[in-house]
Image (tube, grey):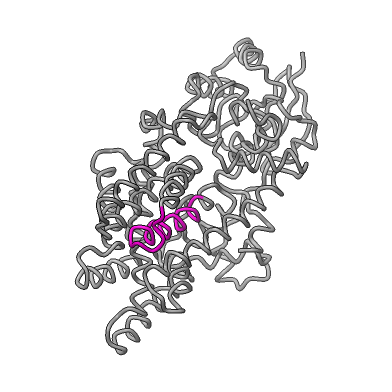
Amino acid sequence: MLGVVVRLPWAGDLGMHAATVQRLRHNLLHPGNPLVDADTPSPYYSPWMVLLGTVAKVTGLSVFVVLRLAALTGLGLLMTGVRRYVRTLSDHRSAPALAFLALLLLWGPVLFNWSGFLGLNSLALTVSYPSVFALGLAFHFWSRLTRTVRGEGGAWGAYPGLGVLWALILLCHQFTGVVASLGGLAMVLAARPARAVLLRLGAGLLLGLGVLWLWPYYDFFALFSAGADLEAIHRPLYEDLAGRFGLVLLGVVALGFRWRRDHRDPLVLFFLLGALVFAAGGLTGHYSWGRALPAALVPAQLAAAVEVVSAGRAAVRRGWACVLLAALAVGAWTQAGTLGYVVPREALPRVVAEKYREPWVGYQWIVRAGVRYGDVVMARTFPARQIPAYGAYTVAPGYPDVFLPDAGRREAAVERYFSAAAGDAERRRILREYGVKWVVGGTSAKAPWLRKAAAGPGGQVLYRVVP
């Protein structure tokens, strides 16, 4: 993973997070929309990203260097958080290492990548994302909460800290915040704390709600009405469940063993809450609820690992260890292509190299051609997901934006500009309306008012808009 941090593969939402740091390093107090030239708030302006933007502004480090520092911090938080939480489940010296292997490798025979999901390949592609930082905080939150409700350090000062930490997770990555909340609820239900402890937890919860309400960069509670804009992109979370997560069934069996020993086992309750939210999302068409799936996966994966050291008889433990080892080997082989992010592809065995997926190339070439910070670029969706990482804006955002009121109009303008049915006058009007200085497209995008400035990978061409 340290090698991955050095290379920082270009994929997924990396452009969004780089663009967020770009805006903050230029204006910490009023950064505006991270993707388009508009004065709107954004849920990406979390406390963590504000801190990264501050680091970039104060030190002068490039955005991608700052994201590498973010990746190192997120990895550190994740590893220490997993260790601390697993220690609340078992004091066996091998339990944390087994748990980390299960979180990374116990998935399925079909490769699956999504931010907020801890598969090895997914982690390699999202290691610098706020979701990894938030997941690390979540494990620390569960650890601290478990010890607090058990009476192991439940002084009054612990409760406000838990409330602030819970709010911080929600602000940094809202979907991981839901997972953290479900896990926290499961741990409180499992512990059955005294009334005085519940009252203190309630006070900490109120403090956390106050932090969410006071956060100045965006209205957290407005996100509850934004789910309809996110359903379509999350529908794939409900596809090919057996292929993507089939090995997790081993953890479900382990949860069954834990339930037989204790009907209020925290991992069992955690799994049930996560599975309930995930199933409800699929049944009602609220596919964005599928992002709660880690609330079912994580406890199952942890249970599979901890069962190796928790089963009663030695023969049972050895048998379970062999089954887990075989499942981890299958998961590791599925994700073997992750090695390609560290080792040159030509140095990999052919069967492993075939599993490697090339990361995106990026659009740094348009900066060398003259595109400057704040310039507006006309581009289709895929390049629009990368171009803002280098400081420019695009006409339409490459990602759904719940706080951008004219997002639909902007998307229609881009689609119309590149449509063969649009006339020259209409295209010129669109360029003037949005202050476009550059156009990225293929050779078919050429027009009398465009002057070729540079050629990039995949037949892409950068044109300068001329009067």
Between residues 86 and 413, which one lies in front from this camera angle?
86
Please say whether residue 151 is one of the residues in the magenta stretch. Answer: yes
Residue 297, percent across and down? 36, 59
Magenta region includes residue 456? no
- Main SS class of the magenta portion in the image: helix
Q: Which residues are magenta?
A: 134-155
Residue depicted at x 65% and y 48%: 67
Residue at 47% from the left image edge and 61% from the top image edge: 119
Left/right of residue 203 with respect to residue 344 in the rendered view: left
Residue 93 location (% of width, % of height): 46, 79
**Residue 252 horizontal side relative to residue 413, left or right:** left
Q: Nearer the viewer, residue 342 or 115?
A: 115
| Residue 334 vertical position relative to residue 180 in the rendered view, above or below | below
Residue 59 versus residue 445: which sits nearer the camera? 59
Residue 370, above or below 12: above
Whole-percent x and y of residue 292? 36, 48
Residue 356, by quadrant, is bottom right
